[in-house]
Image (cartoon, rainbow, N blue to C red):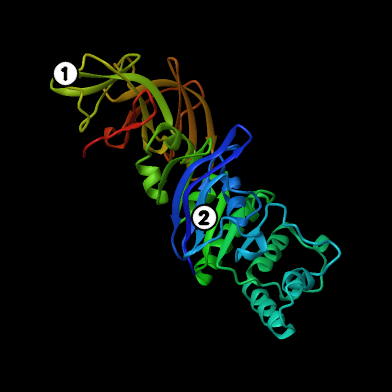
Amino acid sequence: MPSVTFDHVTKRFNDVTIVEDFNLQVADGELLVLVGGSGSGKSTILRLVAGLEAVTSGTIRLGDTDITERAPRDRDVAMVFQDYALYPHLSVRENLSLGLRIRRVPKEEVSRRVAWAVDMLGLTELLDRKPKQLSGGQRQRVAMGRAMVREPSAFLFDEPLSNLDAGLRAQMRMEIGALQRRLHTTTIYVTHDQVEAMTLGDRIVVLSSGRVQQIGKPIDLYRAPANRFVAGFIGSPPMNFIEGALEHADEMTWFVSDGMRIALAGVSAAGLTRREVTLGIRPDDLRMTFPSSGTAVEDGSIRGRVELVERLGGSSHMHVHAGSLHILAVVTALELPAVDDVIDLLILPQRVHVFAPDGQAIAIQG
């Protein structure tokens, strides 16, 4: 299957820039996820590939073919929409075959492709049903099948699971991932759900206000976010942020904030009196202890009062109030504190992230 290449693609509506100077190559057979909040430009990028929106400037290529100005039907891509877009008066069989019949594909070929998609998606027993007789997950499989029978060079998914409940979303994520691995078709998948992005994507593109914030493998974005936006967007529950400063003392670099001190190996503040920064720490990188009565807070720890404990089975989320800070910690301890208990949260220096005032990550050397 061919790659999809974006070369300095920009999209404007009047004076409003929706996508700005987007450059990317989606590799042959790759499942690439575009993720971001509302208004980030992710769905617009998908519509530009499909030809549903016109590019303001730049080019889009499918393999070696420039498809920037081609009509949607001539682009050899197939799109799966959020709302399924099935014809309610047609059966599953008819919905699957309609696009092929409109293109006057020979009947034998239509039958072959429909049979292949039906077998791949487990739709055999549903062929004579109308969409209203199907569950949400079944409708989504039919919508996927309708795209599959096209046998396109690229699949485009526009938030296909957002109308499903949590259980079905998890099931359909597995099905879409397994299907893409079997077909090895170049795929661009749009979602606002970072869990979908992390579990499905070979690579993820994080977008904000039409600009690329970071591109990389899911684990790389999680472990080494390029800026504060990516750090807060990727990861569930989200990262904690603590405002403070770097100071140099005792031949060490320290992060200081509201009486809290954390030694940071690998970060240099030599020659600086004070440098304002933001410290980021993921909730599952905090360690909980019960302080002894009358003891002072040790360097590298936060002492606070428990406001809420959310018990989730194997782990629990603890909301802790510490001075002006609200900290969320994920713990797996069998002995959990009660609301209003005082606890210490140990911060692991090797797991922290440091961000400059402009939001960019400050490199930490190992």
Please indicate, yes or no, whether residue 126 appears anywhere in the rendered image. Answer: no
Q: What amino acid type is highlighted by mark number 2?
A: Ile
Mark linked to residue 271: 1
Q: Amino acid at mark 1?
A: Gly
Placement of 27 over or under 337, stated as above or below: below
Location of residue 157 in the rendering, given as x and y in whole percent from the top left corner: 60, 56
Most foreground residue, 252 or 327: 252
Q: Is residue 89 left or right of 255 when viewed as pictured?
A: right
The residue located at (17%, 24%) in the rendering is 252
Q: Is residue 78 above or below residue 304?
A: below
Snapshot quadrant of residue 294 = top left
Asked which secondary structure carries label 1, the reply is loop
Badge 2 crowding class, 10 Å Cα cut-off, few under 14, some 14 to 19, many 20 or more, is many
Q: Is residue 142 left or right of residue 35?
A: right
Q: Position of residue 242 (x, y in %)?
A: 39, 23
The answer to whether 360 appears left or right of 306 in the picture is left
First-in-chain label (1 vs 2): 2
- Marking on residue 148: none
Identify the residue under disc 2. Answer: 60
Which residue is at 63% across, 65% downward? 74
The quadrant in which the C terminus is found is top left
Up/down of 346 relative to 294, above or below:
below
